[in-house]
Amino acid sequence: MIRCPCLSGLTYEGCCGPLHAGTSVAQTAEQLMRSRYSAFAVGDAGYLSATWHPSTRPAELTLDEDRRWYRLDVLRTERGGPFDTEGIVEFRAYHRSPGGNGSQHEVSRFAREDGRWLYVDGVG
């Protein structure tokens, strides 16, 4: 069993895997953010595009294959629960690449439309 890249403590099959496969949808903004981080970690650009709000989604998305994401720290959440229509998740994600180690800090905005959470944008 493979541990989920989002570091929830669950297996990939019991956490982000069903979201990536399209057999489940995120119930909270934080769950969507964790699944998007995992999509970066496993190289699933299709999931990232599908969960990006149409108003801010780039026409093309290319992932850096040399960047390996290995740790996610969720720093705070605001709203984003099952009955909210918007939410904010602040996180720091860590990566390694041939050029060295790094991290990305972001405060991300999410919106829930038609029962699905979508990533809107983020400020680093």
Image (cartoon, grey):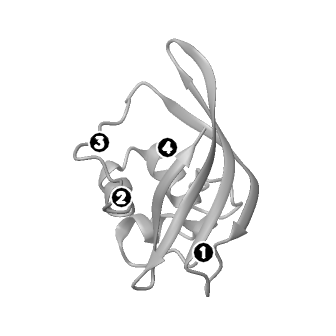
**Numbered disc 3: secondary structure:** loop
Q: Are marks 3 and 4 in contact (CB under 8 Å)?
A: no
Q: Residue furthest top?
A: 99
Q: CA distance from mark 4 to mark 2?
A: 12 Å
Q: Is residue 88 visible?
A: yes
Identify the residue under disc 4.
41
Q: Are marks 1 and 2 in contact (CB under 8 Å)?
A: no
Identify the residue under disc 3.
61
Q: CA distance from mark 3 to mark 2?
A: 11 Å
Quarter of the image with the C terminus in it: top right
Identify the residue under disc 1.
28
Residue drawn at (60%, 62%) of the image = 11
Q: Residues within 10 Å of mark 1 (few under 14, many from 20)?
A: many
Query: Which callout, 1 or 4, points to the residue nearer the camera?
Result: 1
**Numbered disc 4: secondary structure:** helix
Q: CA distance from mark 1 to mark 2?
A: 16 Å
The disc, 3 or 2, on the residue closer to the chain's N-terminal end is 2
Query: Which callout, 1 or 2, points to the residue nearer the camera?
Result: 1
Q: What percent of the width, then of the height, locates residue 107?
A: 64, 49
Vertical position of residue 115 compared to residue 19: above or below: below
Residue drawn at (65%, 79%) of the image = 81
Residue drawn at (36%, 54%) of the image = 56
User: What amino acid does circle 1 point to?
Assistant: Thr
Q: What percent of the width, then of the height, locates residue 54?
A: 31, 62
109, 75: nearer the viewer: 109
Q: Residue furthest left?
A: 59
Task: Please tell me the numbered disc located at residue 47.
Answer: 2
Q: CA distance from mark 3 to mark 4?
A: 15 Å
Quarter of the image with the N terminus in it: bottom right
Task: Please tell me the numbered disc located at residue 62.
Answer: none
The disc, 1 or 3, on the residue closer to the chain's N-terminal end is 1
Q: What percent of the width, then of the height, locates residue 67?
A: 47, 28
